[in-house]
Structure formats: structure tokens, C-alpha cells
């Protein structure tokens, strides 16, 4: 088989060789970019470690005042979820998610951006109910970085009523609890976990 060279492929090869040439000729610039990237990542990691050592990662950030993007409207969510029997909470550093679990299984999460501002609340629902709610509320979308059939994301600055969100969180809790073995369910509900 013979390769036929076209102007487009010649231009692509010329661009690639130009980039390679620049990388070879200016290694200091590449090194500066890499050092800056790792310094930024280290600063972010240090901030997260400071929050963990001060116990701040164990609470959902207070809402940003005023109307705007990513304002946490549901300030009650942390206390509401932790009041349920057997619920534990942790911060998944790699994802920057505050996860709420029962029996080691996540049933809800508050997804934080790089500035630790909530941008989604993830929860599990029956597929039919989740699909229906997505058509009714524009602030309920398929699960962010999750199985889009079972998981749904609620925008924290959205217009989903508090009572509805509480009901959805209750259903998510019951769904995950119901998926555990009967023995594990008894241990959790009796508090002997």
C-alpha cells in the first residue's frame, strides 16, 4: 500500500516538526511550564491538607452571598444527611467531593470546584424517577461523573424546592441501604456497625 501525500498531511507534519523544534530549542520554557503546573498542584494540595488538619473539610462551605453561579442554597444538607442513622462523611481528595455513605456505599455527594465552592449535589434515584425529574426541573441533570442512569446531579444554586431535595435524599439513602445485605442493614439500623 502506498501513502499518498497531500497538502493537508504535509502541513500537519510541518506543524508537528515546528512544535518539536520549538521544544528542542527552548527547553527552559517547557521546564518553566512544568514547574508552574506542579507548583499550582502543590499549592492546591497544601490548601486541602490545611483544611483537613483544621477540620474544615468536614463541613459544606457556607453559601456565597448574593445571586450568582454556584451559590449553595441548601445550607441544611450537611446536618440533614448526618442526622440519618449510620451515615458517615469523608472528603475524597482526588475528586474534591464530600461523600455521604451508609455501610461504605455512597448515597450522596457534594461536588466542589477548585475553589471549594459546591457545583453539584449527586444522589441516587430509580432510573424512571430520575428521568422524569430531569424533564420537570432544569436544575436536575444526569449524574456528574457518575452512572447517568442511576445518579442525578442537582445544581446547588438551582430552583429545586427544599422539600423535594430532602425527599430525593431520603430516597437515595433508602435505595443504597436497601442494596446492602440484611445483616448489614440490621447492624446499621441497630447502631452496632
Image: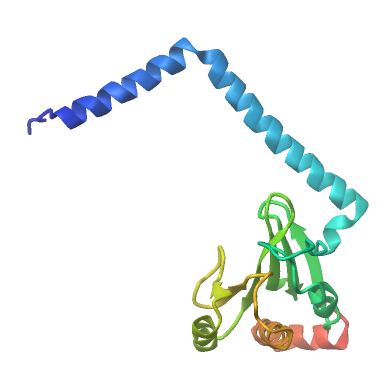
Q: Which x, y percent locates residue 77? A: 79, 75
Looking at the image, which is closer to me, 22 or 158? 158
Left or right: where does residue 176 sit relative to residue 43? left
Left or right: where does residue 145 sit relative to residue 183? left
- The residue lying at 66 percent from left, 55 percent from top is 95
Query: Which corner quadrant of the image does residue 62 belong to?
Result: bottom right
Instruction: Indicate the quadrant containing the C terminus: top left, top right, bottom left or bottom right.
Output: bottom right
Q: Going by the picture, which residue comes out furthest to the top?
A: 25
* Up/down of 99 relative to 183, above or below: above
Q: Going by the picture, which residue comes out furthest to the right?
A: 54
Instruction: Indicate the quadrant containing the N terminus: top left, top right, bottom left or bottom right.
Output: top left
Query: Which corner quadrant of the image does residue 165 belong to?
Result: bottom right
What kind of colouring is applied to the model shown? rainbow
- The residue lying at 85 percent from left, 62 percent from top is 58
Q: How many numbered dots are placed on residues in this image?
A: 0
- The residue lying at 73 percent from left, 88 percent from top is 163
Query: Which corner quadrant of the image does residue 154 belong to?
Result: bottom right
Looking at the image, which is closer to me, 2 or 31? 31
Q: Which x, y percent locates residue 36? A: 65, 28
Q: Going by the picture, which residue comes out furthest to the left?
A: 1
Q: Which x, y percent locates residue 23? A: 45, 18
* Up/down of 58 relative to 31, above or below: below
Amino acid at each position: 500500500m502506498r501513502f499518498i501525500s497531500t497538502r493537508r498531511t504535509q502541513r500537519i507534519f510541518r506543524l508537528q516538526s515546528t512544535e518539536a523544534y520549538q521544544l528542542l530549542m527552548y527547553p527552559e520554557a517547557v521546564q518553566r511550564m512544568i514547574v508552574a503546573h506542579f507548583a499550582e498542584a502543590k499549592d492546591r494540595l497544601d490548601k486541602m491538607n490545611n483544611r483537613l488538619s483544621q477540620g474544615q473539610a468536614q463541613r459544606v462551605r457556607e453559601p456565597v452571598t448574593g445571586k450568582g453561579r454556584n451559590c449553595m442554597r441548601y445550607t441544611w444538607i450537611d446536618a440533614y444527611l448526618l442526622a440519618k442513622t449510620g451515615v458517615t462523611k469523608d472528603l475524597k481528595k482526588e475528586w474534591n467531593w464530600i461523600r455521604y455513605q451508609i455501610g461504605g456505599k455512597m448515597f450522596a455527594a457534594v461536588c466542589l470546584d477548585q475553589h471549594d465552592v459546591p457545583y453539584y449535589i449527586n444522589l441516587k434515584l430509580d432510573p424512571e424517577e430520575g428521568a422524569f425529574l430531569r424533564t420537570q426541573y432544569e436544575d436536575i441533570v444526569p449524574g456528574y461523573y457518575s452512572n447517568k442512569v442511576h445518579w442525578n446531579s442537582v445544581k446547588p444554586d438551582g430552583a429545586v424546592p427544599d422539600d423535594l431535595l430532602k425527599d430525593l435524599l431520603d430516597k437515595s439513602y433508602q435505595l443504597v441501604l436497601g442494596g446492602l445485605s440484611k445483616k448489614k442493614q440490621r447492624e446499621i439500623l441497630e447502631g452496632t456497625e
